[in-house]
Image (tube, rainbow, N blue to C red):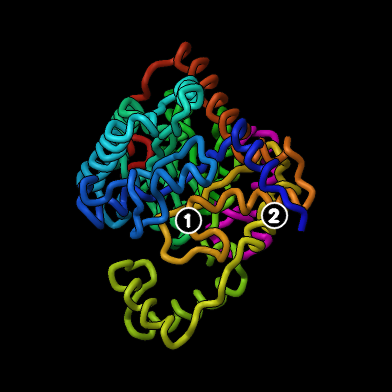
Amino acid sequence: MTSTSQPIATLLATHPVWDGHNDLPWEARKQVAYDLDRLDLAGDVRTTHTDIARMRRGGMGAQFWSVYVDAKWAGEKAVTATLEQIDFVRTMTTRYAGELALAVSSADVRAARASGRIASLMGAEGGHSIDSSLGALRMLHTLGVRYLTLTHNDNVPWADSATDEPVLGGLSPFGHEVVREMNRIGMAVDLSHVSADTMRHALATTTAPVMFSHSSARAVCDHPRNVPDDVLAQLSDNGGLCMVTFVPKFISRAVREWDLEAADTAAAEGVHWADHAAYTPFLERHRATHPQPVATLEDVVEHLEHVRAVAGVDHIGLGGDYDGVGVLPTGLEDVSAYPRLLEALADRGWSDEDLGKLTWSNALRVLEGVEDTARDLSASRGPSTARIEDLDGV
C-alpha cells in the first residue's frame, strides 16, 4: 500500500471532514444528564466515540449534531425533549467556543473554518419532533436546526418510515406541505430513515437539494435504511447528497443476516427489535452465544464506490452515525478514523478533487442550495398556515 498520510493531511487542511450525523447530544443526555463537568469533551473521553481531540485527529471541520429524541415519545414530550437537545448543543458550543462554533448558515461554516474552529450545525432526527405542526417546524429552524429527518424508525402521521409498516405509501398531503415549508424556510429535507416511497414523494415535491444524513447503498446491502439505486440516480438532477454511514448492519451483508436472525430470536422471546429498552440488553446476551460478524472499513469503501458510480461524485458525503450505534466497523472505531478511510479511497484511485468533494465541498454546496431556494421562495410567499387536520382529515 502506498503511503498517503501526508497528502491526506494536506487535503484535510483545506477540505476537512463535514459529517452528516453524530448522536453525541443523546449520549450526553443518557450518560450524564447533559452535565459537561462529568463528560468533558476537552479531555480524554472513554465512554463516547467523540471528543474534541479525536475530532481534530480525524481532520474534522464541520459536524451536524443530531438533536434526536426517542421516536416513541409522541406529541409535546418529543417537542420538549428536542428543545433540550438543542439547548445542549448551544451549551456545548459556548463551553468549547475556542474549538467549536455554532453554525446556522453556510456563511457561519466558512467563518468557523477561517477561525480554525469546527462548525457545529444541528439536525433533528424525526418528524415526531415537530408534532405535526408547521409552527413548531419554523421554531426549530429559528433555534438553528438546519435539517429535519422526516421520520425515525416509526411512521409519523404524515410520512412512512423505512422500518415500520407502510400506511400512506409515502407522504400524505400534509407531508408534502412539510417538504414545501422546509424549502421555504431553508431547512434541508433529510431522507435517511424514510421509506423508499417517501424518498420518491419528497424528491417529486422538493425544489431544494435533499440529503441523506446517514444512509448507504441498498444494492450493496439490502437493508431498508439504505437508498435504492433509482433514488440515488435522482440526486444528480436534484443536486442532493447521500452521506454514507458506517452502521454495521447497514453496510455488511453478513451483519445484516445476523441481525435478521437476532430479531427473529428476540421476537420468539417476546422482544421486538424496535423496543430499544428491551432489545439492547437482548442483543448483549445474544452476542455472547452468537458472535456478531465483523464489519470493516472496506465495507464502507464498497458503499462509497457504489454511490459514486450511481449518483456521481458530486452527490456523496460521509455520515458516520458515531455515538448512535454500539458497534462500529474495524478501522472506523471513532471520529479520529476518517483519514484512514480517505487513505483507502486514495489507494483505490480517488483523486484529491474527488476526496475534497466527499469530505467538504458537496455538503457546503447542498447547504448553499437550500439557502438559495429559501431566499427565492420566501420572497414570493409567506408562512404556510396549513394544518394536518385540514389536509389529511385526521
The type of residue carrying mark 2 is: Ala
Q: Residue furthest bottom?
A: 289
Residue 275 horizontal/vertical position (percent):
32, 68
Residue 338 horizontal/vertical position (percent):
57, 49
Residue 360 horizontal/vertical position (percent):
59, 35
Q: Which mark is residue 205?
A: none
Left or right: 26 as drawn, with respect to 123: left
State the residue in front, 116 or 308: 116
Task: Name the residue located 41 percent from the left edge and 34 percent from the top edge.
Answer: 120
Task: Name the residue located 71 percent from the left edge and 48 percent from the top edge.
Answer: 4
Gap between marks 1 and 2 measured at Cα: 16 Å
Residue 332 horizontal/vertical position (percent):
54, 58
Secondary structure state at the residue bearing disc 2: helix
Q: Which mark is residue 344?
A: 2
Seen in the picture, residue 92 relative to 260 is either above or below; the reply is above
Q: Quadrant of the N terminus?
A: bottom right
Secondary structure state at the residue bearing disc 1: loop
What are the residue bounds of the magenta stretch?
215-240
Task: Name the residue located 22 percent from the left edge and 47 percent from the top edge.
Answer: 34
Left or right: 269 as drawn, with respect to 348: left
What residue is pinned by disc 1?
334
Crowding near the residue tagged with mark 1, few <14, some 14–19, many ≥20 C-alpha atoms within 10 Å: many
